[in-house]
Image (cartoon, rainbow, N blue to C red):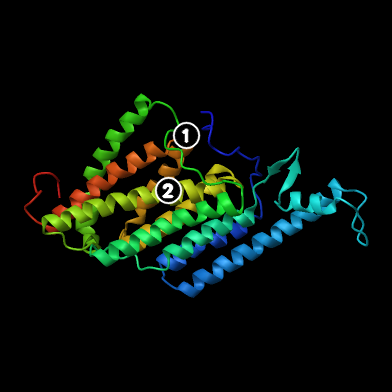
Amino acid sequence: MPAHPDAPPSPTVAAWSWRLVPALLVCLAAPAFFVVRVPWLGWVLLAAGLLVALAAERTDAEPLARRADPTRTHDSTPAGSDTVRSRVLGGTATARGSSIRPPSLLRDLSLIAAGLLIVSAIPLKAELDDLSILRFALALGGAVAVPYAISRWVYGDHAIRFPWRGGGRWTAFQWTWLVAVLVLGWLILPFYFITSGVYLNWPVVDTPELIARLFVGVGAVGIWDELFFICTCLALLRRHFPFWQANMLQSVVFVSFLWELGYQAWGPLLTIPFAFLQGFIFMKTRSLTYVVTVHLLFDAVVFLVLVHAHNPGVLDGLFLV
């Protein structure tokens, strides 16, 4: 399927590159923050990843700069070398008055790091009081808005986009998958939440107001998941690595966040395939609307299971467990 018109051009990337090292370090900060919950370890991993990315870009820049400017010697700096260096290191080069900003691993990893730092600033335990909702809104909203703003108005490369209208009309297979998501959720999620006891990671919802708050909260976090993990993390990583590598890296971040949110016990057996599939579906459809719809249908079942688990007898006829 052709890329959405708003999508940045897909770069040619090597099958394997040692640039995976800084990307992996940055993504491993997520389990440090959200799984083992050792903030200083997450900070160290982020710093190490960005430093290695900087070293990688400088190492790659030198031979490229020498090939671009063969008159350059170690003891002299010919005219125009600053432009060459700027172009190779991902700076701004001017061609007929236009700004060219090639992908930079350092810049793109710094955007992911910024989002992770913002999210890690708050506890992710699900709570439904006004203060907790405000805290979630500011942190999660900032984790999407800040990298987007830096990419567009500071770095000037507009690497993060949200193709709500991308992908064209949904195919018969896409509509079928939406039904399959509901059926799979209905079969699997009640068994997972109730037999493992992880439903206790979410607050008791036994009044209409709390049920309404849970409904809004589950849906809002589901939409945010796609904005950050897919449209931000995956999109940035895809500029430097083959899709399957970028998807594995974003899944590390995705699953780590869901772990602290409450999908624990054997939850990764569900969340890992889900993270992979959401990345794959987005790559195939180029439609944020579609992946958000898939996620919201899944989360609708999550919401009903949580209400069922906290209120025995209310929805007993709806689920098998």
Classify 289 as above or below 225: above
The kind of residue tagged 1 is: Lys
Q: Residue at x 57, y 57 (%)?
A: 109
Q: Nearer the viewer, residue 39 or 190?
A: 39
Q: Position of residue 203 (x, y in %)?
A: 20, 63
Return the mark for residue 313: none
Q: Residue at x 60, y 67 (%)?
A: 48
Would residue 256 appear left or right of 89 to someone viewing this image?
left
Classify 22 as above or below 10: below
Return the mark for residue 284: 1
Whichever of callouts 2 and 1 sits on the residue coming sooner in the sequence is 2
Instruction: Determine if residue 252 is in view.
Output: no
Return the mark for residue 227: 2
| Quarter of the view holding residue 309 | bottom left
Q: Position of residue 59 (x, y in %)?
A: 75, 58
Q: Nearer the viewer, residue 229 or 246?
A: 229
Q: Nearer the viewer, residue 296 or 321?
A: 296
Q: Residue at x 73, y 53 (%)?
A: 89
The kind of residue tagged 2 is: Leu
Crowding around mark 2 (Cα neighbors within 10 Å: few <14, some 14 to 19, many 20+) is many
Q: Position of residue 97 (x, y in %)?
A: 73, 40
Instruction: Determine if residue 70 is in view.
Output: yes
Residue extending furthest toward the left: 313
Q: Secondary structure at mark 1?
A: helix
Crowding around mark 1 (Cα neighbors within 10 Å: few <14, some 14 to 19, many 20+) is few
Q: Secondary structure at mark 2?
A: helix
Would residue 18 appear left or right of 186 to someone viewing this image?
right
What is the C-alpha distance between the residues marked 2 and 1? 17 Å
Would residue 51 appear left or right of 225 to someone viewing this image?
right
Which mark lies nearer to you, 2 or 1?
2
